[in-house]
Amino acid sequence: MNRKDFLNLSTRAAIFLGVSPALIGCKNEEDAKIEADKASEMLAVSKAMGTAVGLTSEPIPKVKVGMIGMGNRGSVLIQMFEYLIKNNYAEIVALSDLKEDKVNKNNEYLKTIQPKGADLYFGNDTEWKKVADRDDVDLLIIATPWNYHTEMCVYGMEKGKHVGCEQPLAMTLEDCWKLIEVAERTKKHCMYMENCCYNGEELWVLNMINEGVFGDVNHAEGAYIHDLRKHMLHDTYYENQWRIKHHEVKNGNFYTGHGLGPVSFYMDIGRGDNYDYLVSMSSKEQSLSEAAKNSDYPVKKFACGDMNTTLIKTKLGRTIMLQFDTHTGRPYSRLNTVTGTKAVHQGYPSRLYIGHEELQWGHRWLSDEKYKEYRDTYDHPLWKKLREQIDAKAVGHGGMDFVMIYRLIRCLNQGLPLDINLYDSVLWSAITPLSELSVSNESQRTVIPDFTGGTWKTPRKNEVLREII
C-alpha cells in the first residue's frame, strides 16, 4: 500500500471512529497508524465514565414490564414470564406492535397466566412510545427489527425506564456512544439480552473456568452459524423481510452476541481484560443469491459474504475467533470452543479434554462417563436451582431464555447489578460496525475503542457467578 492509499484508508477509519483526520497527518505510515490508535483510545476513555459498572437501583418488588415488538421473538419472550408472574415477581402491563393481530394473539396467551391481560398499543410506528411514557412501567423489553433498537433504548432510558433489548443494541459506533452517554446520565440499566450467556453448556464451562479446571484461558471461538435463507426470503417470517435487507448492502458480522457473549464471559472481558483490535474478512457471497434465484425476492445479489470470520486480540494477549454465516446449508453451531492451559472444551457436540498431570496425556476427548462426571460436578448453580422450571417449559431455546428473563427480573427485584451491563452490551454491539470497517478496508487491523472508561482494568468476578437469587 502506498502512502496516499494508506492515508486515505486511515482518514476514513478515523472519521468512522470519531477521530479527527488531522490527527493522522503524520510523516509516515507507521506514525499515522500509531496516532490513529492513540486518538481512538483517548477519545473512547473521554466519552465513557465507567459509572455503570456495578450499577444498582432501588429494589422493585414486582417489576412492571412493557414489551415492544410482539413478532417471532417477542412471542417467545412473553412465555418466559409465567413462573415470574405466578410468583408475583413481575407483571406485564403493556404490549406493543405495529400489527393488531400480534398484540391480540399474545394478550390471549398472557391472560392464561395473568387473567387481566395487558394494555395494547398498535397501529402506527410511534405507538410504542406510549408504553415508555407510562408511569407504571419499570422495564422495557424490546424485540423489534434491529434498526429501531438504539432509538427505543434511548427513549426508554430518557423516560426513566430500565431496558432489556434483543441484539444488537446499536449498529453504528455513533449509536454505541449515544447509549453510553444516556445510560450513564440517567443511571438506568441497558442490557443486551444475550440468551446464550445463560445456556446450560455455556454456564457449565464458565463455572469450570472459575473453579480453575481450565487453568489460564488463552483462546476461544464463538459463532452464529445458522442457515436462515428460508426464513429471510419468506414473505412474512421477518415482517417486510427486514432482516435480509441488511445483507443487500453490508458485509461483516451482523449477529455477534451468540458467540461473543459467552466467550467474553470466559475471558473476563470488561472485568480484567478488554478487546484491543480486530481483523475481519468475508468469503465471497454465493449461497444466498442462489437461493434468491428460486424465490420471488426481487434482489438476486447480496453484499454480505457467506462466511465472515473476525479475529479479536485482547489487551492481555488472548485471541478470539468469531464467525457469522446465515447463508450456507450446514448444521447449526455456536462453536463454543475454549482453550486453556489445562483443559479444552468444544461444542456441537459438547466435548471436554482434560490435560493436567493427574490424567494421562493424550489426544482423546473424555469418555461419556468422565464427561458426565464433570458435568454433574460443575453444573452451574443457577441451572440446578431452576431445573424444575426449565424442564417444565418446552419453549425458550432449551431453557436459556427463561433463565435470562428470570435473572433479569430477580436482579431488579433485589436492586442488584445485572449480569450483562451497559459496557458488555455496547462492546458486543460495536463489533458489527468494526467488522464492516475492517472488511471494507481489505481486512485492515481495526482498533476497538475502550467503551468502559478504563474500568476494564479492575479485575472482578463475573456477576452471573454470584450467589443465586
Image (cartoon, rainbow, N blue to C red):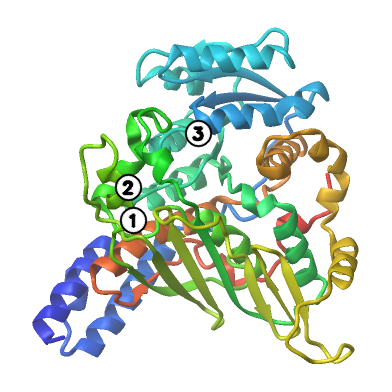
Badge number at residue 143: 3
> Given the current orientation, which residue lies at the most extreme top position?
116
Residue that label 2 marks: 291
Q: Amino acid at mark 1?
A: Ser
Picture quadrant of residue 97: top left
Frontmost residue, 133 versus 440: 440
Q: CA distance from mark 2 to mark 3?
A: 27 Å
Q: Amino acid at mark 3?
A: Ala
Dot 3 alpha-carbon crowd within 10 angstroms: few under 14, some 14 to 19, many 20 or more: many
Q: Residue at x 44, y 60 (%)?
A: 324
Task: Tell me if I can see residue 135 in this picture.
Answer: no
Q: Amino acid at mark 2?
A: Ala
Dot 3: element: loop
Dot 1: element: helix
Q: CA distance from mark 1 to mark 2?
A: 6 Å
Badge number at residue 287: 1
> Given the current orientation, which residue lies at the most extreme left position?
4
Left or right: residue 427 compared with residue 464: left
> Quick one: label 2 or label 3, which is nearer the N terminus?
3
Dot 2: element: helix
Frontmost residue, 330 versus 30: 330
Whether 281 is drawn above or below 385: the answer is below
User: In the rendered view of the protein, which quadrant contains the C terminus?
Assistant: top right
Front: mark 3 or 1:
1
Spot occupied by residue 321 in the image (x, y as percentages of width and height) = 50, 72
Frontmost residue, 214 versus 395: 395
